[in-house]
Image (cartoon, rainbow, N blue to C red):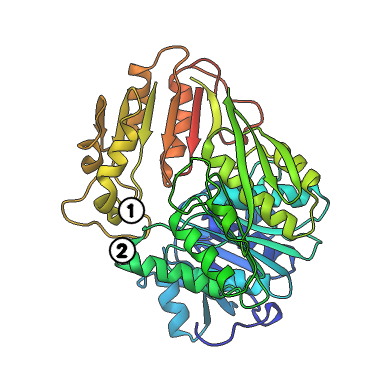
Amino acid sequence: MSGPLPRLAELGHVHFLGIGGIGMSGIARIMLQRGVEVSGSDAAAVPALEELAAWGARVGVGFDPGRLSGVDTVVCSSAVRPGNPELRAARDAGLRVLHRSQALAVLMANRRAVAVTGTNGKTTTTAMLTEVLRHAGMDPSFAIGGQLISANTNGWNGSGDTFVAEADESDASFLVYRPQLAILTNAQADHLDHYGTSAGVAAAFAAFVDSLGAQGVLVGCLDDPGAARLVRDRAAAGLAAVGYGRAGSGTGSSQPSESSDADPAVAFVRIVDEQFDSGTTAFTLRGDFGEQPVTLAVPGRHNVDNATGAFCAALQLGVSPAQAVAGLAAFTGTRRRFEVRGRAGGVVFQPHLYSRTRDFAHQFGQALSAADLVAVTEVYPAREDPIPGVSGRLVADHVGAPVTWLPQVGHVPGWVRSVTHPGDLVLLIGAGDITAQAPCILQALGGQPQAGQPQEQHPQPGPASQGSGG
């Protein structure tokens, strides 16, 4: 749909194509909470269908144009092909068709809109900021590309005036949003199937920052060259910008430097004294608020970055430093991002998208080489058609560690059972259906579910299995 977006009251009966997807289901849930009549279809009977039906949505498996009876608005994502029978029927009938991002923008209207974007870290940073605001009693609305474990949902219509949304840059659809506050975790070359060149990616991020307008505030990581450039450009134009990082030099360096302090136009929050131990993370944030020690229940240097971006944004929303730190300490993660599924070393990697596999096979192989054992499965295509000569084998060929090529994802549990020993860690990495293998792996190893897992998942004690959403 082009032109001005409709108001929520004008949408009527809304039908989602691919309603069970992590991005679509959250939007559908918020619409249900706001009293919108919702229906939807999905290619498979994923767990979200049952959950949405319990909330009042009419859902079905498979795509049947007959489901469009009484529908006023159809919502689809870039993953829905033009030949989808329901989408074709909707266009033929002259129904209003909205992209997923447009539907989310409708929900964000008349709220204090916060958009979180970047090549990596969007989901976790969005979830961390949401957790902080919830902990501070602000009850925000939120739409996240993953389930916030503490809330057991990826979408919520809160009573507060703030709406926190993950803004997907993969197809440039994030340019439809008009946020008052944005977090830019990083800005790197990715999704070249859509943008064509790294310059195209950079231009899209610049346009997103411009969408903040003169009154908006940009929070960005100064350790990432792409994000640092946009933060400094905005500050140089006399517009509000907050930077965070270790060096703050925008060179990607993690070495302490005073260069960040030389630009008084950029407010700066520095990360110091990082400590990593047994799945927990501790560090200190230093800024015009003084110093704040931070402890996270999630591991990794990347989560220090994510948490610091969320901290800076929370302060812009009126949360005190102490409240922000308390909220971050309460954050227990999002599903499929280093989520402990049980006790079960090695890595199982499922490449995501043919174009990304073609463009980054060497880099993926290098990263996986740090593991003791690696298995690579076939590409999870998502929205893409196959590219001749491109398969997960490309990644396997670049791994500098013992590697097994498993084109059939169903063979993963048997492979894990054959190579693991007590005390080993099994890490599932991928944005597709690879995490569905976690309960199968745990069953193959004879274990029990991890405490606190959703009922449909079946994790265990013994050698630790985790899942990462990629």
Q: Which mark is residue 420?
A: none
Residue located at (76% from left, 49% from top): 289
Instruction: Estimate the x, y position of residue 313 in percent, counting from the top left.
Output: 68, 56
In which image quadrant can residue 64 be found?
Answer: bottom left
- Residue sitting at 67 percent across and 82 percent down? 10
Residue 7 location, x and y as percent? 67, 81
Residue of label 1: 353
Label 2 Cα crowd, 10 Å radius (few <14 / some 14-19 / many 20+): some
Relative height, residue 399 to residue 82 (above, below)? above
Q: Compared with residue 217, is residue 296 higher up or lower down, i.e. above or below?
A: above
According to the image, label 2 marks what residue?
193
Residue 81 horizontal/vertical position (percent): 37, 68
| Most foreground residue, 255 or 61 | 255
Residue 405 pos. (x, y %) = 24, 33
Of badges 1 and 2, nearer the viewer stands 2
Alpha-carbon span between mark 1 and mark 2: 9 Å
In what quadrant of the picture does the C terminus appear? top left
Q: Is 147 drawn above or below residue 464 in the view shown?
A: below
**In terms of image quadrants, where is residue 335?**
top right
The amino acid sitting under disc 2 is Asp
Amino acid bearing label 1: Leu
- Badge 1 element: loop
Residue 217 in sight from this viewpoint? yes
For the residues labelled 1 and 2, say whether their Cβ atoms are less than 8 Å apart.
yes
Which of the two discs, 1 and 2, labels the residue nearer the N terminus? 2
Give the camera-side residue of 104 and 274: 274
